[in-house]
Amino acid sequence: MSLLNNKIAIVTGAASGFGAQIARDYVEEGAKVVLADLNLEGANQIAQSLGENALAFKCNVAIKDDIDGLVNFCVENFGTPDIVVNNAGTTHRNQPLMNVDEKTFDLIFDVNVKSIFYMVKAVVPLMRENGGGVMLNVGSVAGIRPRPGLTWYNASKGAVNTLSRSLAVELGPDAIRVNAICPVLGETGLLEHFMGVEDTPENRAKFLTTIPLGRLAKSSDVSNAAVYLASDKADFITGVEFPVDGGRVI
Ligand SMILES: NC(=O)c1ccc[n+]([C@@H]2O[C@H](COP(=O)([O-])OP(=O)(O)OC[C@H]3O[C@@H](n4cnc5c(N)ncnc54)[C@H](O)[C@@H]3O)[C@@H](O)[C@H]2O)c1
């Protein structure tokens, strides 16, 4: 049986990495999905490979009008979203905290945090009308156990993790479940930025020693969690910082 039959979902940052795999798995599990990304060409390619239950939409999640446009697009084409995955994110390169400039700080907080403020404003009234919904925010283990070199990114993901729990408390009475997914370092476009060094086997080995299960996160690890948490099997799960990290946060 498909876990997301007839559900309607929005996935941001769906042109690559974790978001692309979440979109693929959601469609495979029976959902209709809007794939939102700055990179329309990438989102379109994936949407087209998934058939009529997937549509791409160009959206900068750091802009309120873009988020409003995204939610309207979903409503007009598929209906009110049952599931929203706030996955789009960005980072500064791994470096000493004093070297990161204000413009970069603002970009990180606009894309990683303020985008969720805009999305909540746009989607919660619709979910309330609909009798409930699910929001998943892609936080990070970086927001639970920060490490040097990514301080401002870590802070943004700490905000994502905490706001997810706070939303869960406040939106519980509306049957809107909110959870944060917290991946460890993963094999995506952001990998070298997080490592701050070239992606070589020697450099990877240093990071792997801190992960008990001994490997990086795959997009499928994150999408499996995103399918479960969005499905009715997780009906009583809300306000969780869900590590997908091979034991990294222990
Ligand atoms: N890769 C990791 O190690 C790791 C670990 C923990 C958390 N995360 C988080 O996972 C999420 C997905 O990242 P990923 O690792 O798949 O990287 P990725 O670079 O492969 O994918 C990120 C996607 O977001 C899109 N995007 C960036 N800024 C955007 C904006 N303003 N509006 C719309 N789309 C935008 C990009 O175009 C890209 O398609 C991010 O929130 C990231 O912080 C990643």
Image: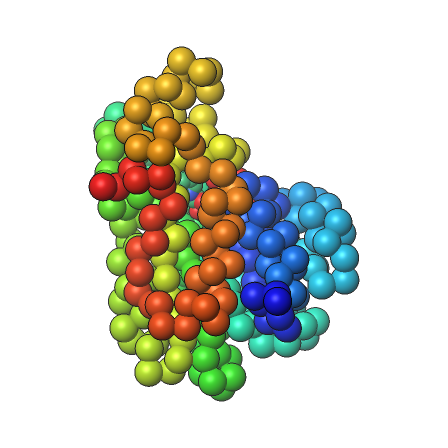
**Along the line of sight, which residue is nearer the eye, 65 or 217?**
217
- The residue depicted at 71 percent of the width and 63 percent of the height is 53
Q: Position of residue 140 (x, y in %)?
A: 35, 45
49 on left or right of 195? right
Q: Position of residue 144 (x, y in %)?
A: 25, 46
Q: Is residue 122 visible?
A: no
Q: How is the image coloured?
A: rainbow
Q: Position of residue 82 (x, y in %)?
A: 53, 73
- The residue depicted at 48 percent of the width and 56 percent of the height is 226
The tally of labels here is: 0
28 on left or right of 210? right
Q: Is residue 41 above or below residue 197?
A: below
Q: Is residue 206 above or below residue 155?
A: above
218 on left or right of 35? left
Figure quadrant of the N terminus: bottom right
Q: Position of residue 89 (x, y in %)?
A: 45, 46
Quadrant in the rendering for residue 150: top left
Q: Is residue 166 visible?
A: yes
Figure quadrant of the C terminus: top left
- The residue depicted at 67 percent of the width and 72 percent of the height is 78
Residue farthest to the front, as pictured:
1
Q: Is residue 212 above or below residue 38?
A: above
223 on left or right of 91? right
**Along the line of sight, which residue is nearer the eye, 51 or 128?**
51
- The residue depicted at 36 percent of the width and 57 percent of the height is 180
Quadrant in the rendering for residue 215: top left
